[in-house]
Image (cartoon, rainbow, N blue to C red):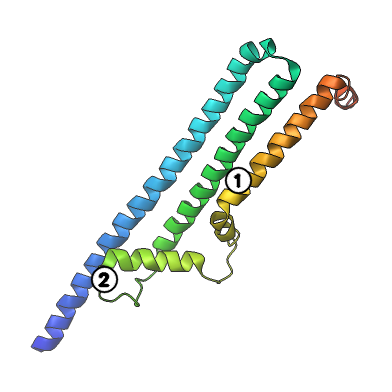
Amino acid sequence: MTEASLVDYIRQKQETHLEQEARASLLQYYSSKCTAHGTNFLTIAIGFLTYVEVARYILPSFNSLLRSVFNSFFISIFVVIAVHQIVRLLVWARLTQIALSIPPSEKLENLCMHVRLEKACQDSFKSKRVTKDKWIVPLNGYRYWISLAIGVTLFLGLTIFQRSLIENPNLLSPLFFSFSSI
């Protein structure tokens, strides 16, 4: 083995070691993001259940219109935040999956290995390559607009639905009657 080939061998081993360390730290970062967003979603669920329990005691003291608006507003807020957290959880989970096997970006040869790996993950995530979960990318890109649309639609729909139930309390009775007869 010549001296030049020995130097190349050592350099290759060091690069492989650096890549593995960078991949491990990137996977740890992405996994912690997944855990954080999953925890946030569970917190939102607990908050929603707390709201339902508190609303049973507080909301009956308001008039029917204010009660409908209040209920619709808080339910819409909980749903929008939950949808946002689920989308972020899916994004970080997909990035974690990509980080397992993607080679470092060759475009950024002069930067550290961690940056090259993260850039390769981001590029692969945003690429035009068709995968089974490609719908996550536009959902992630427009998550604020989608959340706003869901929130406004849900708020208006729930308010109208609750108002129609107040005006016509027997609106759902045929539905419940048909289920009870089964």
Question: Front-most of 151 and 128?
Answer: 151
* Quadrant housing the N terminus: bottom left
Disc 2 marks which residue? Answer: 111
Picture coordinates of residue 17, whole percent (x, y): 22, 66
Picture residue at 87% right of the left edge, 27% below the top? 175
Locate residue 174, reporting x and y percent.
91, 25
Of the 4 image quadrants, the one containing the C terminus is top right
In the displayed structure, 115 sits above or below 155; it is below
Q: Earlier in the sequence, mark 2 or mark 1?
A: 2
Q: How many marks?
A: 2
Residue 93: in sight, yes or no? yes
Choose between 47 and 6: the one closer to the eye: 47
Q: Find residue 84 and report its image quarter.
A: top right
The residue pinned by badge 1 equals 147
Q: Is residue 82 left or right of residue 68?
A: left
- Quadrant hosting residue 122: bottom left
